[in-house]
């Protein structure tokens, strides 16, 4: 095998790895997430209790997920360097405004970045929802976050309704219309 063939083989392997990672990022649960029987195998399904956590916000105040039982919570795992994370900020602001009179809360969980960097980012983008710091990625690992942004919707009882929801609006409408 000559050098050109080896380089081509390496490029094909790299392309395959990237394609698999991209597929897993876009379709993190596939169709199995909707099947309760398989959610424990993936440990990232729906209809399971959202793992509780405590993180500090940009003001140093501790935020505990279970303190928000009775509210619908949208967890947005993100980073400041991610272009798509920046592009969904207006949508998240819109959701916050649309459901301001409901028991709805958005918690942005920034992964592995300094408070200063995240604070500057939140100020620059005029983020109106709560920003939490997951400095060591412990919570991201707990939730099996592979790519960002990663949106996880939690119902009033603390159960995960969807991960990477196809339609947050439809899910929220359904949650707020149910008793």
Image (spheres, rainbow, N blue to C red):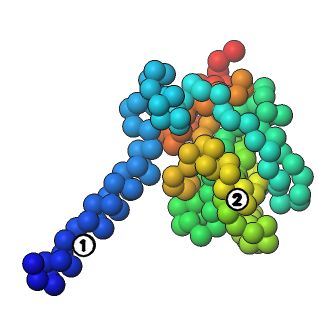
- Which residue is under mark 1? 10
* Residue pictured at 13% horizontal, 78% vertical: 5
Q: Is residue 52 above or below residue 34?
A: below
* Quadrant in which the N terminus is drawn: bottom left
Q: Is residue 36 above or below residue 74?
A: above
Which residue occupies the foreground of this view, 160 or 3?
3
Q: Residue furthest top?
A: 179
Q: Residue furthest front?
A: 1
* Residue pictured at 24% horizontal, 72% vertical: 10
Q: Is residue 104 left or right of residue 7?
A: right
Which residue occupies the foreground of this view, 76 or 97?
76
Image location (x, y in percent) of residue 70: 78, 26
Q: Is residue 167 left or right of residue 121?
A: left
| Image quadrant assignment for residue 50 | top right
Q: Residues within 10 Å of mark 1 (few under 14, many from 20)?
A: few
* Quadrant in which the C terminus is drawn: top right
Asked whether the viewer can see residue 106, the reply is: yes
Mark sitting earlier along the chain (2/1): 1
- Which residue is under mark 2? 136
Image location (x, y in percent) of residue 16: 28, 60
Instruction: Identify the element where label 1 is drawn.
Output: helix
Numbered label attached to residue 123: none
Q: Residue furthest left?
A: 1
* Residue pictured at 83% horizontal, 45% vertical: 63
């Amino acid at each position: 095998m000559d050098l050109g063939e080896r380089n081509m083989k390496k490029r094909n392997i790299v392309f395959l790895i990237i394609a698999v990672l991209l597929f897993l990022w876009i379709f993190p649960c596939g169709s199995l997430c909707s099947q309760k029987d398989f959610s424990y195998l993936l440990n990232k399904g729906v209809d399971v209790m959202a793992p509780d956590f405590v993180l500090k916000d940009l003001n140093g105040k501790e935020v505990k997920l279970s303190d928000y039982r009775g509210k619908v919570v949208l967890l947005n795992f993100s980073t400041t360097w991610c272009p798509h994370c920046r592009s969904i900020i207006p949508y998240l602001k819109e959701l916050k405004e649309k459901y301001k009179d409901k028991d709805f809360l958005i918690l942005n969980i920034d992964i592995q970045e300094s408070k200063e960097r995240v604070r500057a980012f939140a100020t620059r983008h005029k983020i109106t929802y709560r920003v939490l710091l997951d400095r060591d990625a412990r919570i991201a690992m707990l939730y099996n976050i592979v790519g960002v942004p990663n949106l996880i919707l939690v119902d009033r009882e603390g159960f995960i309704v969807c991960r990477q929801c196809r339609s947050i609006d439809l899910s929220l409408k359904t949650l707020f219309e149910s008793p």
